[in-house]
Amino acid sequence: MLDKTYRPEEVEAKQYAQWEESGAFAAGGQRSNADPYTIVIPPPNVTGSLHMGHALDYTLQDILIRRERMRGRDALWQPGTDHAGIATQMVVERELEAAGTSRKEVGRAAFLDKVWDWKAQYGGIITQQLRRLGSSCDWSRERFTMDEGLSRAVTKVFVELYKQGLIYKDKRLVNWDPKLQTAISDLEVQQTEVDGHLWYFNYPIEGIENKYITVATTRPETMLGDTAVAVHPDDDRYRDLVGKHVALPLANRRIPIVADEYADPAQGSGAVKITPAHDFNDFEVGRRHELEMVNIFDESARLNENAPEAYRGLDRFEARKRVVADLEALGLVDRVEQQTHSIPYGDRGGVPIEPFLTDQWYADAATLAKPAIAAVEEGRTRFVPEHWTKTYFEWMRNIQPWCISRQLWWGHQIPAWYGPDGSVFVEESEEAAAESAAAHYGERVTLTRDDDVLDTWFSSGLWPFSTLGWPDETPEIERHYPTDVLVTGFDIIFFWIARMMMMGLHFMGEVPFHTVYIHALIRDARGQKMSKSKGNVIDPLELIDEYGCDALRFTLASLAAPGRDIKLSGERVAGGRNFATKLWNAARFCQLNGCVPQSEFDPASAKETVNRWIIGELVGCADQLTQALDAYRFNEAANALYQFTWGTFCDWYLEFAKPLLAGDDERVKAETRSTAAFVLDHTLKLLHPIMPFISEELWEQLCVDGAARETPLIIAEWPQLDAALIDRAAEAEMRWVVGLIQGIRSVRSEMNVPPAAKMPLLLLGASAENQERLAAHRDLIMRLARLDSIGTGAAGAVPPGSVQLVHDEAIAALPLTGLVDITQEKSRLVREVARAEDEINKLEKKLANKDFIAKAPAEVVEDQREYLNEAQAQRAKLGEALERLAGV
RNA sequence: GGGCGAUUAGCUCAGCUGGUAGAGCAUCCGGUUUACAUCCGGAAGGUCGGCGGUUCGAUCCCGUCAUCGCCCACCA
């Protein structure tokens, strides 16, 4: 027997262990002949711990995977984690720091050992947390981006791209993080608004006494690296200065005044200082004018030997103060303005990044992007919601060279070796590089490997095929690539999706997935982005502890409407918890009433209208669910299930079943028991993808024919319900019954009839069909409308003092003599009349419109006529009711 | 500067191809009806941001304005 209350924590632990042990998550095996269905997980950082974004992302994927698995497909949810270069290195560095040492002190090899130790100890946390979410990943296939196999894939890809000329080394400005001392990509730079200053400096013009050119800057310290001043070629104010020189103060250098269209006459003074080594725009100007590039910073953004001696060794912000003070002392500060501007921060290091001139490895993203753009244009990969396509195109069509090298230790070391003269040999192994070098030099030489590692996203970009075994030719590659759908947030469209598209197309010749489903971001209840510093982070594990995993999953699914941010609060999850409780109690009711699933039961054989009706409703729910999930409308899927389970099955069907089960017609009782069990069983199946734990537990406990289940729900067959089971006549009949009960309840409540009080009902002037309906459902109408008798009669035979309820062609009269205030009843009827008349007016107006009749589809016109007839009939009935009331 | 999205009940939001606006929560009234108070029954609450247009008909399509949010680029 089911416990009185549902205990999620026990059920979740038990069921997950059973699933995992039974091998239910594993792809292949007996399913190897089935149609494959594949999702690769967006690999969480190995340093990560489960947050709400993960919870949503993985819940949605699990819903899709579980449904396809039940549909009999060879469902593979490929799990794994990402080595997360910077994040992981930082975590271990912090540990070292706490232990009083540092990365540089312990050395590269020992440091990497420490990172692997750390990974062995803590790297499994996130995957354990994933299990608590109910994620049905094939854990036997778990991968890590630094695994041997995946590393081999990375090396092969690098070498091939290099040999194809799609990876090259270049010296240019990069975004440099002075704290982490590595290059980072454009995407890892976050612009942040700050209050700052705009300084105007006067640079003395050489050869003209007391003549200055004024330049403005937000970064005074960079003036030490200035190698020109630029003015617009058409700017009359400066035309005669072009070609002259400026005596750069403090640095005591002579720099030219050049004409370049980059200088905007409308901005600042119209003259702009040019620091090619420390500004992306200036770099371009420098190239055009073949200016000297003076790099004044070292790797930690302290001033180096290229700066005047007085400034060497100073931090960039310290240098800024000194430069301003020294220029002020020289009387060369024209003015200072307050200004807010945005400055670039490294999103990991948290300090302002510095444009810095270094040698780095680049991938030719523009070339790789072409097929990736075409694939989306041609619909081979489709974004859902579709509008993300634009964002993808926007970025891909303006893509910049991708800086793929990082000056870190944790990551895939670049397979490039340098000979004594600096010649580079890019090969898949040191041995191959040595051979290649020997061929080049004519003798074996000592080679030095490039210290740098690759951007983490370089390996993540291979994820859809590297996890399946590439570069080896594996059966998994054959079966599961391309994968079916990628589910993720929009924040990594550029970082990850774009790269997977490029890499997948280049190396596999096919798109990595047919569909990209982009879900919203989760925010707190007030719509704020969750962040540790704001303290508004909601921990999914805490929600699971408090409300149960299924409650959280259901809630997330029901909020996952395409295209909008999700505001989450505990209250919402409580709603999901309530739903689980409701389901549990409905199952208890069924069990207590002997509603045991019968393997032999054929739903088409049901005779009772109530049973035929609920079976039809079930079919309708299954249809809605299928359509919703096919379209990735998770919210509609959840809502369909909620409405059916609670609003239809519990609120109406089980209530209808009570009198039937308490009656004495054994055939009806047996059929109702079987039907209830059948519907509940199928509801569990339909609910399973979203609420796997409670559905599995109930499935297990509500046994077929009293024996144990043949298969657990997780691999049970997905319902295939024939649309022929929908009985329109039964539907209409039950709609009539429900309407009658609702009408009576409403009147009772409005008239303040005590809920416990029973009363008689007279249905007057009803059609033969409705009289039959009334008779057929007499017991349940009496029960649910709280009646003590039901009678029928001719139209107009309303006993004095009755409340009169118009229900279709009939009047339901409730003799409430003594209980009813006549004036109150009268005003109720008057209100009803007014409502009906409004309706009639609207419809008559519409139908009087010749254009409407002529141009609207006949079907629509017909509908409107019908509405009008109904409204008029109702109006007439209400009129009669009023007259009778007046006649009392 | 370029792009995207949003504006619907007190709150949070659904409303997919234009044809009588929905849910959850909150509110109010009433409930020991033998599965469930994490519940049951009932009610109230909306000129669908403003203005134009297309259409027989607009919450839905188009234009425009307003407000809010996000992304990208730039910022001497």
Image: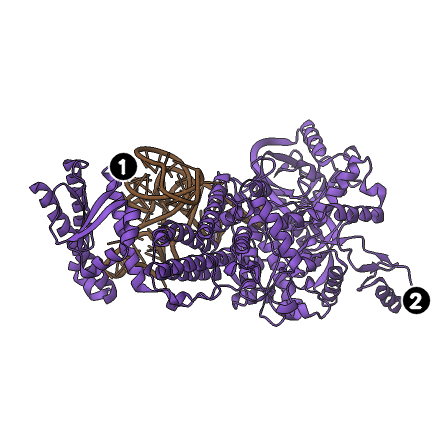
Chain colours: A purple, B brown
**Pointer 2 local density, CA inside 10 Å: few below 14, some 14–19, many at least 20:** few
Above or below A618: residue B76? above
Give the residue number, with chain letter if any, for mark 1: A754
Which one is in front in this view, the residue at disc 2 or the one at disc 1?
1
Question: What residue did someone put label 2 on?
Answer: A443
A502 lies above or below A276: below
Which residue occupies the foreground of this view, A562 or A360?
A562
> What chain does mark 2 sit on?
A
Residue A450 x %, y %? 81, 55
The percent position of residue A769, horizontal first and vertical second, equals: 21, 61
Specify the subunit that label 1 lies on.
A
Q: Residues within 10 Å of mark 1 (few under 14, many from 20)?
A: few
Badge 2 amino acid: Glu
For this view, does A356 lie left or right of residue A598?
A: right
Left or right: residue A802 versus residue A477 is: left
**Please, what is the three-letter code of the amino acid marked with disc 1?**
Pro
Q: Nearer the viewer, residue A851 or A426?
A: A851
Q: Under tag 1, what secondary structure?
A: loop
> Residue A112, image x and y in percent?
80, 49
Q: Tell which residue pokes out farthest to the right in this image.
A: A443
